[in-house]
Image (cartoon, rainbow, N blue to C red):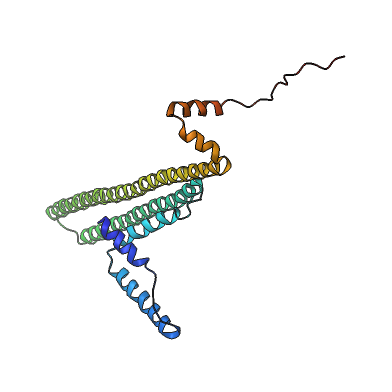
Amino acid sequence: MLKLTVFFLFLTSLPAFSSDQSGSDQELSLKQDREHLEKLRKEIPEDIKRENDDLAFILKLFEDKSRHPSKIRREFNRVYNRLRKEKRKEFKKQRDSYTKAEKKKRKKFLADAKSKRKAFLEGDPSSDKKKEFFDEERTDRKEFFSEERENRRDFESDLRAKRKQSDDFLKDKKRDFTERLRQFEKEQKALREQERQAKLRAARPQSLAVEAELTPKNQEFLKDFDKIPKRGGVKLAPPPEK
């Protein structure tokens, strides 16, 4: 799945190349390339397409190697929180829509039962007919509300599963981002150390050459010496005569 995702991500990000083409021929080639890639994208399953888009977004955050990690984290969190808010809003909309339809169906059932009961009583039925009618009405009412409760349980169960799937998906993306950010920070730290060492070598090449020839133990002593705070020296000369 990962290989397929990366492959399609690669396809959708391919630049259009041409050799010895110019003018209308080059424009036609670019147009055909774009149409071909767009056709390939339409053939990608929705889950793969979504993974491609998510991966492309996360990778784009780390394009600038000099960018501060806090800015990267802030932009990711902004999109992450927006998506989470949108999904919660979507689930609430689904529940509200179901509840509205449920109330409408219940209201219609009760109204139909009332009309049916009124029409029946207007016919001046016998006691046996009344008993039979009301027994049937109670049975219908019981079955209707029992079915409604079961439908509600199924709906809530399905909605919980969708919400969990959405939460798990977002958590997985956040874990992926956190790991990439941690690696990004390590790379930045390594680059800063390389730059620092380069500056040191440029500033005191002879000193570093001597330091490199020292034993590891003596190099540690030299590092400890460099850590000693620098203070103003004391002039070792006799005081002036009065």
Viewer can see residue 64 = yes
* Residue 238 percent location from the top left of the image: 77, 16
As drawn, 241 above or below 141: above
- Residue 127 placed where, x, y %? 14, 52
Residue 37, horizontal then vertical, whole percent: 33, 72
When the figure is inspected, residue 95 is found, relative to residue 20, above or below; the finding is above
- In this rendered view, identify the residue nearer to me: 236 or 26: 236
154 to 115, vertically: above or below: above
For the N terminus, the quadrant is bottom left
Residue 60, quarter of the rendered image: bottom left
- Across the whole image, how many numbered discs are drawn on residues? 0
Q: Which of the 4 quarters of the picture holds residue 12?
A: bottom left
Of residues 49 and 210, the one drawn nearer to the viewer in this rendering: 210
Q: Quadrant of the C terminus?
A: top right
Nearest the viewer among 218 and 227 is 218
Of residues 180 and 116, the one nearer the viewer is 180
| Left or right: 156 as drawn, with respect to 63 | left
Residue drawn at point x = 85 percent, y = 15 percent: 241
